[in-house]
Amino acid sequence: MAIVVGVYGATGYTGIELVRLLEAHPEVEIAFLTSESSAGGSLRRAWPQGPDRPLVAAADAPLAAVDAVFLCLPHGGAAPVAARALAAGARVVDLSADLRLADAAAWERWYGTPHPAPGLLPVPYGLPELGREALAGAAAVANPGCYATAVVLALAPLVRAGELAPSGPLVVDAKSGVSGAGRAPRTDTVFCEVHGNCSPYSPGRRHRHVGEMEQALAGCGLEPGRLLFTPHLLPTDRGILASLYLPVADARRAAAALAAAYAGEALVEVLPEGELATLAHAVGSPRAVLSATPLTPEMLLVVSVLDNLLKGAASQAVQNFNLMWGLPETTGLVAVRRAA
Amino acid sequence: MAIVVGVYGATGYTGIELVRLLEAHPEVEIAFLTSESSAGGSLRRAWPQGPDRPLVAAADAPLAAVDAVFLCLPHGGAAPVAARALAAGARVVDLSADLRLADAAAWERWYGTPHPAPGLLPVPYGLPELGREALAGAAAVANPGCYATAVVLALAPLVRAGELAPSGPLVVDAKSGVSGAGRAPRTDTVFCEVHGNCSPYSPGRRHRHVGEMEQALAGCGLEPGRLLFTPHLLPTDRGILASLYLPVADARRAAAALAAAYAGEALVEVLPEGELATLAHAVGSPRAVLSATPLTPEMLLVVSVLDNLLKGAASQAVQNFNLMWGLPETTGLVAVRRAA
Amino acid sequence: MAIVVGVYGATGYTGIELVRLLEAHPEVEIAFLTSESSAGGSLRRAWPQGPDRPLVAAADAPLAAVDAVFLCLPHGGAAPVAARALAAGARVVDLSADLRLADAAAWERWYGTPHPAPGLLPVPYGLPELGREALAGAAAVANPGCYATAVVLALAPLVRAGELAPSGPLVVDAKSGVSGAGRAPRTDTVFCEVHGNCSPYSPGRRHRHVGEMEQALAGCGLEPGRLLFTPHLLPTDRGILASLYLPVADARRAAAALAAAYAGEALVEVLPEGELATLAHAVGSPRAVLSATPLTPEMLLVVSVLDNLLKGAASQAVQNFNLMWGLPETTGLVAVRRAA
Amino acid sequence: MAIVVGVYGATGYTGIELVRLLEAHPEVEIAFLTSESSAGGSLRRAWPQGPDRPLVAAADAPLAAVDAVFLCLPHGGAAPVAARALAAGARVVDLSADLRLADAAAWERWYGTPHPAPGLLPVPYGLPELGREALAGAAAVANPGCYATAVVLALAPLVRAGELAPSGPLVVDAKSGVSGAGRAPRTDTVFCEVHGNCSPYSPGRRHRHVGEMEQALAGCGLEPGRLLFTPHLLPTDRGILASLYLPVADARRAAAALAAAYAGEALVEVLPEGELATLAHAVGSPRAVLSATPLTPEMLLVVSVLDNLLKGAASQAVQNFNLMWGLPETTGLVAVRRAA
């Protein structure tokens, strides 16, 4: 019998990808899709190739009819919906930032306003390759940020294996397509501002994902404060490529440790020695792809790529959903890779 | 039991899309992939997200082991392979231009050299929505050109319904992404020559697809000579958008005739009145999408869009393959739409 | 002694190009630049490579201090400023649509609201290659629309020379970069909506420039009603390419007439027979470039390209300004071509 | 009286930019342009907006008629031409890599073959902001590489001022448009391979410009071996953005030192505190633009941007030419900024 789900915020870029995946998911039936701006209209307005499904306002969504909800809502707006859904007995995969930090005070530091529903915290962090145990059967899961997924996947195995040098900055130079900025018109995402351009923003320790990354890596044993994370906007629509410059004791051993850590994973791949990951390895795919290249005996370059709307959002949400319900982790996802 | 197939020319853009579709096709097993330039290597060289399958030279392909072959080869080079395959008892879907024209003399006129295997002609033309009868059980099918598919799908129903004015030019202004030019490096497809540019080429009656279009439309009752087809190269990778400016007796009635003609089709869609087709309706999808807009009472604009690598090549080849083998026509293709 | 000018609306894409040209103009001194959204700030906010000039609100602009103003304002908002400037003794080059139609009733039909200052009409139409006489010494000039410039330049000589067939539609399929839509964030100009896409809009006789084109061509002898103009948005930032499919009595003679008409022009070029105009011929240049290609003995393809921000806006404004003041027409413009 | 010059390799992307600058240079007259592939044709074949100038084979260039030559030739091919030109009494600006390394043995290490004309070495290194003394009156100047210019401009003042920490890697993550790869068709610069992609290459200490950078910085006092330079190909045509992550004693003081170093320079700009350099600051301009942002008290981010075809090649060549001949350094270049 199908698991009945609802999607809040179905007309954003992430929402569309998620609906696409859920439509093809063999164990899922979609009960409702919400959109505040397009309530009363059809999903096809936002997604020309999509099915002709009706959109409802969040307030009108039949929460009682669903087993689970996915929240593709702006930060600050998701937690209250999560609380209502949990109260109605539905499980929650929250793709916003609201449930990612375990601590409401930390959330307030990074997001600048009090946490909208601190009573919900903490919630398991849905990066399955980092640890699946807490996800099985969970009532709510916090789906990681796109940058955080790329960076934590690259660093966690090295931290755990003790391969990082004990001190020194961990430089992460990240590049992202524009869809990460969302669909709402903004001055800086107008076509002519991005075309032919490349621009850094929020350098060092200013980007909100730094808090999320360091929380996840603290769980692996990394002391906070060493990450220097500088994202750059690329003139393309999808994909994240993070270049990590890492001081290590032994670069070849560290590269081997990274490969070994993901040897059994279906949705994270480490390229053979000598190859470098590119956006083309990951765009359209639910898999993250990593490469590890010794630059000197004591400096390792890890390149971590993923599709920000898939492994960085929607397909990882499905991966988490599968784990929450005890389904095989790649259910509904393997076809994506083929079709990418 | 699976139908065993081989793909010639698997590392071009069309070949890759075709292998992707065949990998997901529930009735197909791939026996071999050929590549002259990469024989001995892996498909992953050309397709970073693809499976690690070996590539062989065409001369080494085990023709005796397969039930069917797909030919993604340059024109002039496909027909001899088709002849060998047919002699070995394999059916053929030819994605090149070699078998599209029924008449070797016409082929020589458009392609400038004698036809490489005139004894094979004629072969059924694999545009299923134009006529499926000849495709069921066929030993060989000629897969249409990408431009020809876009243009013939737009015109054929209007010709058949007698909606076109009896004389006057049929102006087709087509725009295409660069992948139609293939993967081999060329002076005019270097990134910097295309980025920021848009360029017409082969205007009027010079493009080779004009012969193919007029042959297909002659079968519907259109006298040759009226088509004026002018393609333009777009600064993007995939997709064709053809704008057809058509003199008609009654533009609203003609628009209705177009919609009616495809009402039952799974892989051709006509948009509701008032909407215009865009590349975004079709890129990544095995469906062609059409819109019909009266410009004046006697002039109709039809916009016809498709993905040149899918409905313009690989997914149409699978559609034809399904019909040849008596499988449901969309087998292995519906998932593409979901995943696009 | 320098001609002192002010620019209204200096931070839009057209405004920036215009300031760039005026900065390099040997006879011009800029007295003020206005911007409602950035008043009090510097031009460098909008134009990173620009000079550090202050921006003022339009209401604070010292009209008494200038000899001339350029209006890069939204339609409906320019005419009242033009009236104020003329009253203050300043000449006006209006780059908006407000002064382009000679007749306030026609303006209301195309723009949907009463004309904001009908007493100003009519004003000379600033397409110098169509006729320079009325521009010399004019107090106000209406700078043509970008699409109108491309289309009228292609058609006017053929109309005047009597080369067009006496009836039949004049099909114009135009393609434009996104900067024509302006800088303000809009749902349809967000990067991800344009990248990888191509979309027709306002087909046939719906676009407002049709009225402007037909007014200009009526002056050459073309009866209104035959133009079918369909623009398409391209995934690039700058440039217009219009493909005109024209019924003519003798295509070779018509092509020769077009070349002859512009033989002496500095800022319109007709390519040699056999070449086709592309965006790359015109982007960054103050020149329009045309090609004329017989498709059949009685159908001529004219491709007309220009930079929508230069010959379609800012450089044409300078060309008009030069004529108004009796300066050589290309003053301040030839360097642009070299530097493009 | 004009300085008469010739340009070898005039039809590549750099050659075209150089001819454009030289055409507008008030003290220069062009005597010949060479192209092996297009000898006998016109420059307009390669540059649609360019002048209709004839191209000759290098062997036919009238060396005796010129005062100076610019060499836009592949590495290995420039030095022999330089030797011939010098022997004929012409001065040389070599835009290839042939004369950049002072030591033929170092050249062989980085380029893999013996130096083609070791007797010419050493030649002054033409990065004027690093030191102009050796350039005045020089017979030959080695024009720096595009990446080297971006990186050395960012690092040299910090090295000289003693602001860098005495040890630790200097991580440089660079991003470049595709024109740096040249105009000849290559598998990896085909449009579809670059569009939507971003790919690292030659990471760490593999890129040939590392040798050039370290030689230039050694002259400022930096011990070789600390640079880790990783370039990435961007989906755009022009521009380099290098992000440098630098260990320093005092990040604010180091930022101030960088700003102070270039306070008097016309063609290098350091942005005000709080701003980050983007490609849009530099594309089309002869200026490099830098920003300096403290990430922590001991880590400084310097972003260095330039147009790889201008400050990274052609406009720097003109800057060097001006210095060689005792002309004001920005002659013929300031207009470029205005027109960019």
Image (cartoon, coloured by chain):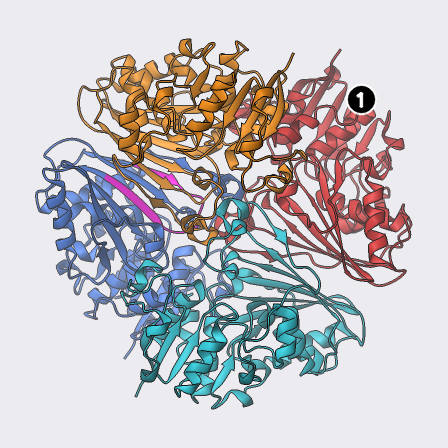
Chain colours: A orange, B red, C cyan, D blue
Q: Which residues, given as a range, are shown in magenta?
A: D230-244
Number of residues whose C-alpha sits closer than 10 Å to that of mark 1, classed few (under 14), some (14–19) or many (20 or more): some
Identity of the residue drawn at 29% across and 33% down: A110
**Left or right: D271 with respect to B19?**
left
Residue B91 in picture, x, y percent from top left: 80, 24
Query: B78 or A278: nearer the eye?
Result: A278
Task: Decide whether residue D240 is among the magenta residues.
Answer: yes
Query: A58 or A315: nearer the eye?
Result: A58
**Does the magenta stretch mainly form a helix, a strand or a loop?**
strand
Residue B148 in picture, x, y percent from top left: 75, 45
Identity of the residue drawn at 75% across and 78% down: C223
Q: Quadrant of residue D5?
A: bottom left
Q: Is residue A203 visible?
A: yes
Q: Is residue B166 above or below residue C326?
A: above
Query: B322 or A125: nearer the eye?
Result: A125
Residue sitting farthest toward the left:
D162
Say what amino acid the circle numbered 1 marks: Leu
Q: Chain of mark 1?
A: B
> Which residue is under mark 1?
B327
Quadrant of the snapshot with the N terminus of chain B = top right
Residue A318 in picture, x, y percent from top left: 52, 21
Quadrant of the snapshot with the C terminus of chain B = top right
Q: Is residue A172 visible?
A: no
Task: Decide whether residue A32 is among the magenta residues.
Answer: no
**Left or right: D309 with respect to B18?**
left
**Left or right: B113 with respect to A103?**
right
